[in-house]
Amino acid sequence: MSFPSAVKKQSRLFSQSGGNGDSSTELRFISDLGRSLLFTVHPKKVASRVADAIQHGVQAEVCAFMAELENIGVVSCSFDEKGEMDPRSFEKSKFEKWLELLPPQVGHKQEDPAEFLLSGKTHKLEYVSPLHINGEIKGAIVVGFSKKQDFNDAKGSLIDAATQMAAMSVNLSSHYEAAINNSINRAKEEHRRFTEAVLDALPVSLYVVDRDFRIVTWNRHREIGSKGIPRESAIGRNVFNVLARYPEGRVKQEFERAFRTGKIERIEQQTAADDGSMQHWMVSKVPMKDPESGEVTHVITVGEDVTARVAAIHAVGRAEKLAAVGRLAAGVVHEINNPLATIAACAEALEQRVEEGVFEGLDAIDDLNEYLGLIKSEAFRCKSITTGLLDFSRIRTGNRHPLDCGEVIRSSANLVSHQKRGEKIDIEIEIADDLALLNADGGQIQQAVIALCTNAIDAMPKGGTLTMRAATHSNRVAIEIEDTGVGIPQEDLSKIFEPFFTTKEVGEGTGLGLAVCYGIITDHGGRLSVRSNVGKGTTFTILLPITAQVP
Ligand code: ADP
Ligand code: MG
């Protein structure tokens, strides 16, 4: 411990003078102590300097300092001949009793060991000098002497004087320390708030867990949305309890891996939103290391909603594929249509001949008729496929006029009602009164609606209800084609818009209906989406922009 040499030199003041210190050495002791305290700004240092100086100065066995200060709490320390000792040997309860019994203005000597404030020592006499701070006794300096004759009144006065200085010093320094603590705490608090605001401003959901899987940070984004959890019910709790909806084993594995490997890991996840649509998430587990030990102390989990990005990537892929197929189809169709027309024409010509009786008497005349019929029908089927392909590849910026979707729906319903086959299918139409007009190609929109209705009917082999709706949603018109059919399995949802994707029997589906529909709608600046529930039904939604060009 550092101690001003002036005070050290003045120690054992009383030894030379045989018990009664002379006043000049006493004064020097006091002034040296005062000077050393001038440079002491920490209450703990004040306490230890004073206790050390007194213990040396009056040749005490032990000297203890104890003060309870409003702004910084308890300050205590004690010195014996060997240096510092355990300040807990100061018995606070006895001190309180002592205060109650005789609130002393100055020091007080005790010779009954039962009354001693310092325990665990062998001293025979104790001198207790109260610390007056702001008019109240806030503590005391207790000095223990190993022999009763080691103490005298002069030493008592000296201890009292030192105690008074200590009281002043410790009071001042405690204010200083409290002020420093306050400003440090305020700066810390400001910094904490700023960090929290930064985390809350990020457009990702974020939380942090410690080694015990306890949540220590939970940002605002993690609070909102259907999967959000309020911060109050997350912070401080075990992450597995908070995220109880997720399989604990999996969540635990992910965290343990991050803690073990210290490597950033990205996991793609999908969740179903409340309306049945899929949401895509990129979840990153970021291990946070202690800069000194390099040990992973926390894991940050960042979740980013990438639904729009995934959809855009799919849309670009789909558009590219459609364009490529379109170019291919246009070329192929051109080459195939001519021979097809020839085949059909030849078959028709032969039929004509049969009718004219040219093959009269031929044994296989029935076969001939049957085969000619087959050639013709198959040629027409090929023709319908090539027409579909052409529709698909044609540039569709055709005739755009003000269009009433309600009309399109009614006439489409009329057309498909004749297509209904097998079991009973009810067609329901719901058209909003305030339906806005579109600037669109009526023929193409009808083609798209009919393609969706045909699929819907195909999906209800046991009958059901086909509902066709149209309504205005802010700046768009929404057309919905809903069925109560078989539904579309999750794994097919991403493929149904691809050209040639079909789950229907050969000869029943071309797999072009939705691809054409998709092309028409996107050409009109609109969007085509689907929601489906296997076994319950499917809803296709067309959103078309209401453009300013509409009169
Ligand atoms: P196609 O009808 O010729 O098969 P589409 O492009 O019209 O081709 O449809 C592709 C596939 O999408 C269908 O084969 C079917 O599996 C599925 N599909 C389309 N609409 C529905 C629907 N409303 N309900 C169930 N499945 C559907
Ligand atoms: Mg179809």
Image: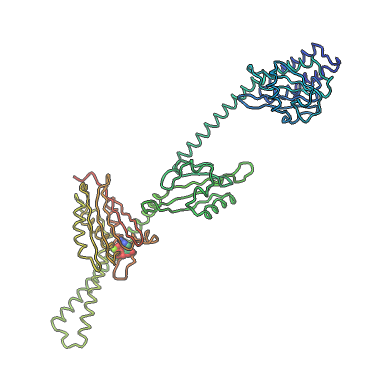
Task: State whether residue 108 is above or below residue 499.
Answer: above
The outermost residue toward the top is 23
Name the side, left or right, on which 40 lies relative to 358.
right
Q: In which quarter of the image is the C terminus?
A: top left
Asked if residue 328 shows in the view, the reply is no
Q: How many labels does the image show?
A: 0
Task: Find residue 423 and report its horizontal and vertical position in percent.
Answer: 25, 67
Task: Find residue 195 and report its horizontal and vertical position in percent.
Answer: 51, 36
Q: Nearer the viewer, residue 251 or 317?
A: 251
Q: Which of 463 and 90 is in front in this view?
A: 90
Residue at 33% x, 65% y is 502
Asked where in the image residue 506 lies, by quadrant, the reply is bottom left
Asked where in the image residue 505 lies, by quadrant, the reply is bottom left
Q: Quadrant of ligand 2?
A: bottom left
Q: Which of 167 and 282 is in front in this view?
A: 167
Name the side, left or right, on which 40 lies relative to 535.
right
Q: Quadrant of the N terminus?
A: top right
User: What coloring was used for the rendering?
Assistant: rainbow
Task: Find residue 457 and report its horizontal and vertical position in percent.
Answer: 27, 63
The outermost residue toward the left is 356
Task: Find residue 499 and report its horizontal and vertical position in percent.
Answer: 33, 62
Name the side, left or right, on which 474 lies relative to 271.
left
Residue at 42% x, 49% y is 306
Q: Which of 102 and 203 is in front in this view?
A: 102
Residue at 41% x, 47% y is 226
Task: State whether residue 501 is above or below residue 439.
Answer: below
Asked if residue 297 shows in the view, the reply is yes
